[in-house]
Image (cartoon, rainbow, N blue to C red):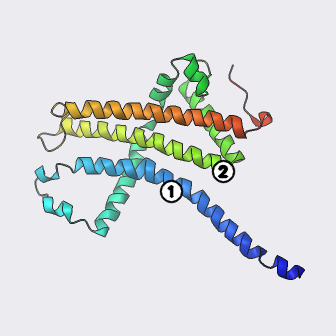
Amino acid sequence: MSNGATAPKPEKEKSESGLSSLMNFVPSAYYDLIARVCPGMAFWVALSFKASLISGVNPKALIEFSGAMLFVLIALSYVSGIVLTGFTVVWDWVSLMCLSTTKMMRKHLGLEAPRSTPFSSRWKAVSLHIDAVVKEDDGAGRVLVKAMAEVTLCQNLLSGLLVLACIGHYSQDQRFFAPLRYMEFYIPIAFALFLSMLFRQAMFLGRVKDLYELYVPEELKFPAAA
């Protein structure tokens, strides 16, 4: 009887191992899809919106969208998203400066270090808190990955909009979106994306602070900045 009771264990352990691997893969895949593929695809769709005005491009070809073209678009969007992510350090700096303007905001978002503290030190403290939460609870870590992906999505969309503006500014004709010609579109879109970025960043930092206080034991917490 004892042998029959213990026989299913290897199969159960194998199933749990496979489920654990899947759960570890999902946050990474979710981050890549939301933070990189989506803004990269939005960039290329906006860039090709006036493709009918580009010499040599047949508008009907844009409608005939094959599976191979979809794969190329997804790959190109992913690469573009990685490139746009390089500018997120600027938006992170702007966000922290804006969200640290009042004492109440700094307290609620866990940014209580003195305002003279360098940006790199502030962001390193946030990163250490994230790592501590992930170490204590995988589920909470996945929540933070999702929130981080949403912040990066807004940042990459804003960077993509600026790249489109630069392309339009330096174009020699009206094939792209010239900023002066389409100012009524650029300003509200940029304003909306900037506010969305600040909101998502505030939600992310607040969640990091709350989960850090909830899951990390007192004896393992990092000493507060003076």
Q: Is residue 151 left or right of residue 11?
A: left
Location of residue 23 in the rendering, given as x and y in whole percent from the top left corner: 60, 59
Quarter of the figure with residue 209? top right
Q: Pointer 1 and pointer 2: residues touching (CB < 8 Å)?
A: no
Q: Disc 1 or 2, which lies upstream in sequence?
A: 1
Quarter of the figure with residue 171? top left
Location of residue 130 in the rendering, given as x and y in whole percent from the top left corner: 63, 40
Q: Is residue 28 above or below residue 119?
A: below
The residue tagged 1 is 29
Element carrying mark 2? helix
Residue sitting farthest toward the right: 2
The residue tagged 2 is 138
Q: How many marks?
A: 2
- Residue at horizontal 51%, vertical 31%? 202
Element carrying mark 1? helix
Q: Is residue 115 above or below residue 141?
A: above
Q: Is residue 47 visible?
A: yes
Location of residue 51 in the rendering, given as x and y in whole percent from the top left corner: 16, 52
How dense is the environment of label 2, judged by Cα within 10 Å: few (below 14), some, or many (20 and up)? few
Q: Is residue 204 left or right of residue 166?
A: right
- Residue at horizontal 54%, vertical 26%? 119
- Residue at horizontal 36%, vertical 35%? 193
- Residue at horizontal 62%, vertical 22%? 113
2 and 201: which one is in front?
2
Q: Is residue 103 left or right of residue 193?
A: right
Q: Is residue 91 visible?
A: no
Location of residue 197 in the rendering, given as x and y in whole percent from the top left corner: 43, 34
Q: Is residue 148 above or below residue 181?
A: below
Which amino acid lies under the numbered mark 1 shown in the image of this protein? Ala
How dense is the environment of label 1, judged by Cα within 10 Å: few (below 14), some, or many (20 and up)? few
The answer for how far apart the CA atoms under marks 1 and 2 are is 16 Å
